[in-house]
């Protein structure tokens, strides 16, 4: 192609229309939007908010629609820089924390505040200073949950306008001055020693109680054993007496039955005389004086005159 015959005006016309065509092509491709997951595109039409594009494929009108803001909908972590706070008892502490928040309304997050991250950090810091100012130093370490819940409540009230939601506010560190730290360490050590002494005293007390309870149970068991022994012996003697009585009654019954039979009385008298003579002989063997009846030939009367016990 010969450009030698092209004039200056023709060159400018070619450049103008070529550039315009290029711009139209670029705008055409820019009007096609693929929105990723957990992203939101804010579209303005002729400078005014038009709509919010969610994840997926979208086509815009070139030269009329434009994407003004891109918001990330994922939960994000924001560090709150360390700041000086004064407790109720006028002790300076340094507090740093972290905020967990996410965008729930992309249009409010774009138009409701200039920079919602910066605004959330500033509001969290001022709220933390206000809450710690109402607490004594000792309670600031114990009331972390209270401080966190109060800050989250305040941030969510503002978040309704900013289009964000604060999920958590966690205090990472509360650092008092070095002198206060030393005093607190001494206090903790003293409290630990006091608890150790109390625990030792309680242990000794419980040990003495256990020993006395053991001695008491030993004495009770011994006395109950002795009582049961005496009961068993008494029951044994009772059984013995009862058995002897039953045997004696049975023998008397048999003797009376034998006497009542024919010749029984004579046999009984004979047995009685024999036993008497045996007893007399035993007494004589033991060198005991024995008084004999005058007429030992009358054996029957002799036996009748003697009262023998069986």
Image (spheres, rainbow, N blue to C red):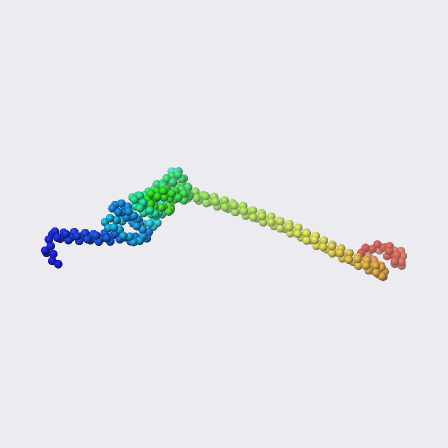
Occupied quadrant, residue 149 = top left
Residue most extreme to the front: 61
x and y, in percent, of residue 288 in the image: 82, 55
> Can residue 69 be seen at all in this image of the molecule?
no
Q: Which of 122 and 25 is in front in this view?
A: 25
* Quadrant housing the C terminus: bottom right
State left or right for residue 71 relative to residue 190.
Answer: left
Q: Where is residue 212 in the image (x, y as percent from the top left)?
A: 58, 47
In-front residue for pair 138/161 = 161
The residue lying at 26 percent from left, 51 percent from top is 60
> Which residue is located at x 77 percent, y 57 percent?
250
308 or 126: nearer the eye? Answer: 126
In the visual, does 238 lie left or right of 273? left
Q: Is residue 55 visible?
A: yes
Residue 107 lies, in percent from the top left, at 31, 46
Quarter holding the N terminus is bottom left
Q: Could you tell me which residue is drawn at 68 percent across and 52 percent down? A: 231
């Amino acid at each position: 192609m010969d450009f030698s015959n092209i004039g200056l005006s023709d060159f400018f016309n070619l450049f103008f229309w070529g550039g315009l065509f290029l711009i139209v092509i670029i705008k055409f491709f820019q009007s096609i939007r693929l929105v990723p997951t957990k992203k939101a595109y804010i579209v303005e039409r002729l400078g005014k908010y038009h709509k919010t594009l969610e994840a997926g494929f979208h086509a815009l009108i070139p030269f009329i629609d434009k994407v003004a803001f891109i918001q990330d909908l994922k939960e994000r972590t924001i560090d709150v820089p360390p700041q000086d706070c004064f407790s109720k008892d006028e002790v300076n502490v340094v507090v740093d924390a972290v905020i967990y928040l996410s965008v729930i309304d992309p249009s409010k997050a774009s138009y409701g505040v200039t920079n919602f991250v910066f605004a959330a950090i500033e509001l969290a810091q001022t709220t933390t200073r206000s809450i710690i100012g109402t607490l004594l130093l000792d309670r600031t370490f114990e009331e972390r949950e209270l401080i966190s819940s109060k800050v989250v409540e305040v941030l969510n009230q503002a978040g309704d306008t900013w289009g964000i939601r604060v999920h958590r506010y966690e205090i990472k560190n509360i650092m008092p001055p070095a002198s206060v730290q030393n005093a607190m360490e001494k206090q903790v050590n003293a409290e630990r020693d006091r608890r150790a002494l109390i625990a030792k005293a309680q242990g000794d007390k419980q040990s003495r109680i256990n020993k006395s309870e053991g001695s008491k149970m030993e004495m009770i068991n011994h006395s109950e054993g002795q009582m049961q022994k005496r009961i068993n012996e008494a029951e044994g003697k009772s059984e013995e007496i009862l058995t002897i009585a039953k045997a004696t009654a049975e023998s008397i019954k048999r003797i009376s039955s034998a006497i009542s039979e024919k010749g029984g009385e004579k046999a009984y008298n004979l047995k009685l005389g024999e036993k008497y003579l045996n007893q007399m002989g035993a007494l004589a063997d033991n060198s005991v004086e024995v008084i004999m009846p005058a007429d030992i030939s009358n054996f029957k009367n002799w036996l009748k005159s003697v009262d023998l016990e069986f």
